[in-house]
Image (tube, rainbow, N blue to C red):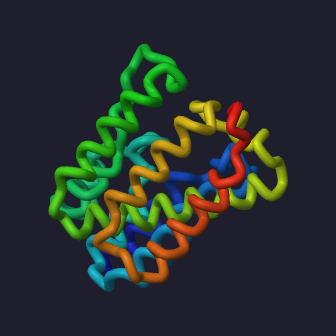
Amino acid sequence: MDVFEKSVAFAIKAHEGQTRKKEGIPFILHPCEAAAIAGTLTNDRDILAAVMLHDTVEDTDATFEDIRREFGERVAELVAKETENAYEGMAREDSWRLRKEESLEQLRNTDDFGVKVMWMADKLSNIRSFFRLRIREGDKLFENFHQKDPKQQEWYYRTIVELLKDFEGTQAYLEYAYLVDVVFGGLDDES
């Protein structure tokens, strides 16, 4: 079993029983979708493994040490670059802007292709989810998130469009930018 196949098995076990709270679907579908997107941008097995594992430290009992031991330094380093600071003792709603600003700053300052692929894959999967929720719930979709202000969400997702211009011209980037426009383009000016 190579590093990517091993990461699939690890992620399935780590995310067992979890659902995506916004859609109610098995959580594992998100890293699988993100890995499929990443596969359109690279065939680097370490990057694909890291994409598969990108939520394990944030959302399961897995630790960076577990990732390092099982998958090596490069995969652990990539997962760390995609993992937000938890700000223990602070409500996720209260730390949202701080976490996003720190994450965006890390993306802004990286030259690591693997980190950028992870962001492109994860955020395209996320905006696809937003789009599905937007169709079903309209502007009420934002009530499902830690950050309920659609303008704050728009700031975050549009900033990512700018920071991932390295992928301009790829199908993943074009779809991402398009869906950001669709999801946030119809917001009521009073929101």
- Position of 66 relative to 129 (above/below): above
156 or 55: which is nearer to us? Answer: 156
- Position of 113 relative to 127 (above/below): below
Residue 47: name its quadrant. Answer: bottom left
Q: Judge from the rendering whether residue 77 lies leftward or rightward of residue 181; answer left or right.
A: left
Number of numbered tags placed on the structure image = 0
- The residue furthest top is 89
Quarter of the picture containing the C terminus is: top right
Percent x, y for residue 146? 59, 31
Quarter of the picture containing the N terminus is: bottom left
58 or 135: which is nearer to us? Answer: 135
Can I make out residue 158 in this image?
A: yes
- The residue furthest front is 189
Residue 189: name its quadrant. Answer: top right
Task: Identify the residue shown where x is 30% and y is 78%.
Answer: 45
Can I make out residue 69 in this image?
A: no
- The residue furthest right is 136
Task: Identify the residue shown where x is 74% and y is 52%.
Answer: 23
Percent x, y for residue 51? 39, 64
Task: Identify the residue shown where x is 28% and y is 71%.
Answer: 166
94 or 47: which is nearer to us? Answer: 94
Task: Identify the residue shown where x is 74% and y is 60%.
Answer: 132
Q: Judge from the rendering whether residue 18 lies leftward or rightward of residue 4; answer left or right.
A: right
Q: Judge from the rendering whether residue 107 lies leftward or rightward of residue 137; answer left or right.
A: left
22 or 27: which is nearer to us? Answer: 22
Percent x, y for residue 33? 55, 70
Percent x, y for residue 164? 34, 64
